Amino acid sequence: MIIEKKDNFHLDEDVVPGALKPLMEEFQDFILLRNTYHAAIREVSTKLEILDDEFQVRYDYNPIHHMECRLKSPRSLFEKLERKGLEIEIASIYQITDMAGIRVICNYIDDVYAVASLLLKQDDIKLIRRRDYIKEPKESGYRSLHLVVEIPVFLSDKTEMVPVEIQLRTIAMDTWASLEHELKYKRSGGITPEMEEELKDCANAMAEVDRRMEEIHKAL
Ligand code: GTP
Ligand code: MG
């Protein structure tokens, strides 16, 4: 699991000049909020690990190939607030549902739906949004099951319901999404419409491979 090093921030009243205090307080609120999102990621990823472990013990099979966790970086948060026309302030962060993100990479399409439904059955998980880009792939060819769930995080003075975005996909879908992202966003100049069509073809080919591999798996 990759989560960046934890921030520590303690507001030392004596060393902060008066004029800077509001800024420092805002900064401290931001660090505290990030810590809460970090806690939510740990809670949801632990639930997923527990489900995967149980499958291992019960059926000698792991539906989850691996997971990737991430807290949105301040840079990408600012970019998103700007893109959505939101003020750069703490209050705006509550309108962003992907501050905490977990990517769950499964072996087969069936595993994606099984893991999602077992997680959503849990009492303390509240479903906020479900988008099935496997049944209805995006125009680009992108496939994944997206869930936004809320989970309670118990803090010293309150309990916060914290949103976590979960992207569930197969290994093949993940391979395509990673490479497509790399090609599309990391190269200057962008890609041509012909390349976009080619990428879509690749996505369809990957989907066909997923379907065929799953048949072999089921036949065994
Ligand atoms: P955002 O405002 O960008 O979060 O869009 P949205 O709220 O409409 O969310 P959406 O359901 O489109 O999911 C956004 C996330 O899904 C992105 O941050 C990517 O991780 C992933 N995603 C969506 N479309 C694509 C795509 O075409 N290619 C790749 N590689 N990833 C995608
Ligand atoms: Mg999003």
Image (cartoon, rainbow, N blue to C red):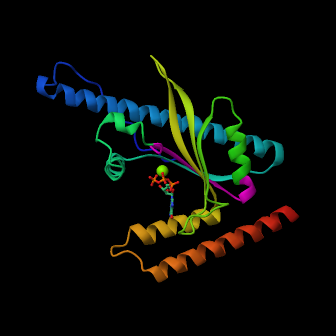
Q: Which residues are magenta?
A: 97-111
Residue 139 in percent (x, y) is at 54, 68
Exactly how many numbered labels are in the figure?
Answer: 0
Q: Residue furthest bottom?
A: 194
Q: Is residue 193 above or below residue 146?
A: below
Q: Residue at x 69, y 53 (%)?
A: 112
Q: Residue at x 77, y 71 (%)?
A: 212
In this rendering, would 170 be left or right of 69?
right
Image point (50%, 46%), residue name:
101
Question: Nearest the camera: 22 or 135?
Answer: 135
Q: Residue furthest front?
A: 85
Q: Quadrant of residue 220?
A: bottom right
39 with respect to 213 (left or right) = left
- Residue 5 at x, y percent in the picture: 40, 41
Q: Position of residue 75 (x, y in %)?
A: 32, 50
Residue at 68%, 39% in the rendered image:
120
* Of residues 182 and 14, the one drawn nearer to the viewer in this rendering: 182
Q: Is residue 61 above or below residue 43?
A: below
Foreground residue among 125 and 3: 125
